[in-house]
Image (tube, coloured by chain):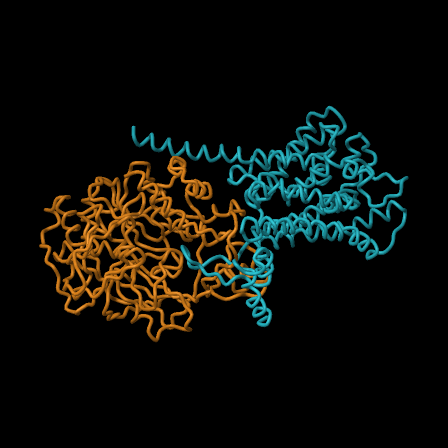
Chain colours: A orange, B cyan
């Protein structure tokens, strides 16, 4: 069997509102692709408002890497191109006609395909952006030769969806996806499962991969953690990675010759009346999840999880890489002497609140910052939730002063902004670490290209 | 609550940019955030945040100082009446010390917070809570009879030159409270060293020497018992005498996870190791003093628990903390035994290691970098 890697540093933030393990159809009408989900991508449009599209019809391509195309997840009509400040393209909204007509990309036996043919087909069908690369966590460079490929088969974030459920009945497509990935690297394909939660035969019986299991608190499910334990990344090296529903999509493309953007999403959070799973397509609008299913009216809607997700509206769209939407209360209130109260219902990684006495307590946490911004005073705390051989604060400071060489030496290639999410949560000084990290990664990427 | 909130909301515009009282913004802000946790919500990154903030952190340290502070107040009275040959009841002794200390505390906070607010206003920052703790530490590491004007000057010096010139809390190199003490020590030695100052309004005939003072001149017959030193029934700076109370504070800091155990433990280990080495050497009576005496005499425990652990001025890497703490303990004992001018070595040991902490961290981080480069080399060969 697999080796079990035990991650001891980290913390599980237990929140109320875990999704109930039932899957229902979402029946979403509108879908959107958000170019902002793709770091470093500059969209060049191929469609305009009013155009009819099929599943797999190209919508736009990346100006800097013209071969990388982004295609429609459903068939229907492009209803609007939403732009933000400086005319930055934010959303391409498609109204589904419910017919599901697809562009045919041709069917061929997987064994007979060469690496180039595979990559070409993935690029053409718009499945390619589902594979990302380290360093920098951007869409994989089709010309790169990854030393290995990581498939992440569980998540350890708060209210994480159960990956076993997401791939139920998709064994064949999943295996086909794995076989395809195996042809893209000369190294190994790693399938990383949870030592505690994973029980799906789809994962456990998967062939053509090395299965590794990880146990411990979040961030045990972060890809960076897996890479650090299995195949640490060095300067100049590339690793590709993806998640399970993407692997299924890749498999289906080659099994059926059609792009398939089906997804199952978890809808969770303390403010959801009936948290459960929904079946739909990539980029679905969450209106049908939220309507009549939300407590209160002062909430934050998040595409993704509470640590790394993106704030969206009540009728917004799920992000390209997101498997879940989360709703938590907003925290825009003043709390009288809040910093001095015993704090039975307050989450803290420190022992300064009474809630520490209740280890398994589940919290209803809001978005209040709980304090003002300060200098980095409480040193030596971040290491407790940062299971890497990297000095987190020193790296942050190197990024702040834009010292390229120091950033490189301190290991910026080995991590992603999400790895700093827990440091950011427990931080006394309320520093926006993920933002700093993203800026640092951006700077490095531009320096390298 | 609501009325108070409404009142604050009404006053707020005056203190904001363009308002009549714009220059008092930092003061208003510190007062407002003291009463109410701000309504700011997460904007980028994680949507949820830990409930802890700088205020919570500092109040925890503040609470951990209280046992030693209260005991110190009592002990000031106890020592005073002991020197007079009197033994009044508990409360008389306590209030004697209480009224000795209260003015020092008020002056320290008044001067310190005043300067902090001025600097926060100039920098357009929020007032940092660091002085909340420094302001209590300073009265605890001086003799009870220290003249108030000296306290005021020392605090001003510490806040301006120990902290603000470097950029404020979080940027300082050395511990501000110790800067204040070092300032007093070198500027006005008459009031903070020797045998005369450690007991408040001491009767002239009574010897007021601290255990360290006795040890330095080889007067080992007059050393108090281990029990007295551990409990703190000895003359000394206000807060430093009771090892027991300091350990209670240490427990609070460790259980809440505010202070780092690595520093604390390694200071005690460093002091013990040095004491044991001296025991082995045994060239004079001081060297033969059982090593654990060093841990309960003078300011060793207080420094180890409340001063050396300052997360800003200590080493900031886990490995570095061991070296830093160990050296603080060693050097403190070394100064005590070897340097005839300074009976107490803790203050200088911590200040010295504060200066060297960044260097220790540098080498720790450097070794991490080397490991990474080695891995890269192994791959490219």
Number of marks: 0
Left or right: A302 as drawn, with respect to B356: left
Is any atom of residue A340 visible in this view?
A: yes
Q: Nearer the viewer, residue B188 or A278?
A: B188
**How far across and how far down the image is residue B230, in percent?**
73, 44
Q: Residue at x 75, y 45 (%)?
A: B149
Q: Residue at x 47, y 65 (%)?
A: A332
Q: Nearer the viewer, residue B111 or A238?
A: B111
Name of the residue lying farthest toward the bottom: A292
Left or right: A392 as drawn, with respect to B327: left
Q: Nearer the viewer, residue A212 or A39?
A: A39
Q: Quadrant of the N terminus of chain B?
A: bottom right
**How far across and how far down the image is residue A321, in percent?**
29, 56
Above or below, comparing residue A288 to residue A191 in the picture = below
**How far across and how far down the image is residue B213, in percent?**
78, 35
Name of the residue lying farthest toward the top: B283
**How far across and how far down the image is residue A179, in percent?**
19, 49
Left or right: A22 as drawn, with respect to B300: left
Q: Quadrant of residue B303?
A: top right
Q: Residue at x 42, y 56 (%)?
A: B46
Q: Quadrant of residue B190?
A: top right
Left or right: A255 as drawn, with respect to A413: left
Is any atom of residue A18 visible in this view?
A: no
Q: Quadrant of the C terminus of chain B?
A: top left
């Amino acid at each position: 069997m697999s080796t079990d890697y035990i991650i001891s540093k980290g913390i599980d933030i237990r929140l109320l509102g875990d999704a109930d393990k039932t899957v229902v159809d979402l029946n979403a009408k509108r879908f959107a692709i958000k170019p902002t989900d793709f770091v470093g991508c500059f969209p060049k449009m191929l469609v305009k408002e009013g155009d009819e599209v099929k599943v797999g019809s190209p919508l736009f391509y990346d100006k800097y890497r013209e071969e990388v195309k982004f295609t429609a997840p459903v068939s229907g009509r492009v209803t609007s191109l939403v732009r933000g400040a400086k005319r930055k393209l934010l959303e391409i909204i498609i109204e589904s006609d419910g017919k599901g007509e697809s562009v045919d990309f041709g069917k061929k036996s997987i064994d007979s395909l060469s690496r180039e043919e595979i990559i070409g087909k993935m690029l053409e069908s718009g499945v390619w952006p589902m594979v990302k690369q380290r360093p920098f966590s951007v869409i994989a460079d089709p010309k790169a030769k990854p030393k290995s490929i990581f498939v992440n088969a569980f998540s350890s974030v708060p209210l994480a969806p159960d990956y076993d459920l997401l791939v139920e009945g998709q064994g064949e497509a999943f295996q086909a996806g794995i076989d395809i990935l195996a042809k893209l690297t000369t190294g190994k394909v790693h399938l990383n499962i949870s030592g505690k939660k994973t029980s799906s035969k789809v994962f456990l019986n998967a062939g053509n991969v090395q299965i590794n299991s990880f146990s411990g608190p979040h961030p045990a499910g972060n890809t960076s953690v897996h890479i650090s334990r299995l195949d640490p990344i060095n300067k100049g090296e590339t690793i590709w990675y993806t998640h399970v529903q993407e692997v299924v999509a890749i498999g289906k493309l080659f099994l059926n010759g059609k792009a398939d953007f089906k997804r199952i999403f978890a809808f969770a959070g303390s403010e959801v009346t009936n948290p459960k799973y929904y079946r739909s397509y990539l980029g679905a609008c969450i209106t049908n999840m939220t309507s009549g299913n939300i407590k209160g009216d002062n909430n934050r809607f998040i595409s993704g999880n509470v640590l790394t997700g993106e704030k969206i509206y009540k009728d917004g769209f799920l992000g390209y890489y997101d498997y879940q939407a989360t709703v938590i209360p907003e925290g825009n209130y003043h709390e009288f002497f809040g910093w001095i109260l015993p704090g039975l219902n307050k989450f803290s990684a420190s022992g300064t609140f009474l809630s520490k006495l209740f280890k398994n307590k589940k919290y209803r946490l809001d978005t209040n910052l709980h304090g003002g911004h300060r200098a980095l005073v409480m040193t030596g705390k971040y290491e407790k939730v940062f299971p890497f051989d990297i000095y987190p604060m020193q790296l942050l400071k190197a990024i702040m002063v834009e010292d390229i060489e120091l950033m490189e030496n301190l290991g910026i290639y080995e991590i992603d902004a999400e790895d700093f999410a827990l440091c950011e949560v427990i931080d006394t000084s309320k520093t926006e670490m993920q933002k700093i990290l993203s800026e640092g990664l951006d700077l490095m990427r531009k320096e390298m290209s | 609550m609501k009325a108070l909130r409404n009142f604050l909301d009404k006053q707020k515009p005056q203190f904001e940019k363009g308002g009549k009282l714009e220059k008092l913004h930092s003061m208003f802000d510190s007062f407002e955030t003291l009463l109410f946790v701000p309504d700011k919500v997460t904007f980028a990154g994680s949507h949820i945040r830990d409930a802890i903030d700088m205020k919570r952190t500092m109040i925890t340290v503040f609470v951990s100082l209280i046992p030693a502070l209260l005991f110190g107040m009592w002990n000031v009275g106890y020592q005073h009446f002991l020197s007079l040959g009197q033994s009044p009841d508990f409360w008389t002794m306590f209030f004697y010390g209480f009224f000795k200390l209260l003015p020092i505390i008020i002056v320290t906070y008044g001067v310190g917070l005043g300067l902090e607010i001025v600097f926060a206003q100039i920098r357009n920052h929020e007032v940092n809570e660091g002085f909340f703790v420094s302001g209590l530490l300073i009265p605890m590491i001086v003799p009870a009879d220290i003249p108030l004007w000296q306290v005021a000057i020392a605090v001003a010096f510490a806040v301006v030159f120990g902290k603000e010139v470097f950029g404020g809390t979080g940027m300082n190199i050395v511990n501000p409270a110790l800067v204040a003490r070092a300032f007093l020590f070198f500027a006005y030695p008459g009031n903070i060293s020797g045998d005369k100052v450690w007991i408040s309004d001491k009767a002239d005939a009574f010897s007021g020497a601290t255990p360290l003072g006795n040890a330095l001149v080889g007067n080992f017959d007059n050393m108090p018992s281990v029990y007295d030193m551990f409990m703190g029934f000895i003359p000394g700076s206000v807060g430093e005498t009771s090892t027991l109370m300091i350990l209670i504070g240490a427990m609070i800091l460790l259980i809440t996870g505010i202070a780092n155990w690595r520093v604390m433990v390694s200071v005690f280990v460093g002091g013990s190791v040095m004491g044991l080495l001296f025991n082995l050497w045994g060239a004079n009576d001081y060297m033969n003093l059982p090593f654990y005496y060093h841990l309960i005499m003078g300011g060793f425990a207080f420094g180890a628990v409340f001063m050396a652990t300052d997360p800003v001025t200590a080493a900031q890497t886990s490995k570095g903390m061991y070296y830093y703490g160990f050296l603080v303990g060693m050097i403190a004992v070394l100064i005590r035994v070897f340097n005839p001018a300074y009976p107490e070595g803790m203050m200088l040991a911590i200040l010295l290691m504060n200066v060297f902490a960044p260097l220790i961290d540098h080498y720790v981080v450097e070794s991490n970098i080397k490991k990474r480069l080695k891995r890269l080399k192994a791959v490219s060969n």
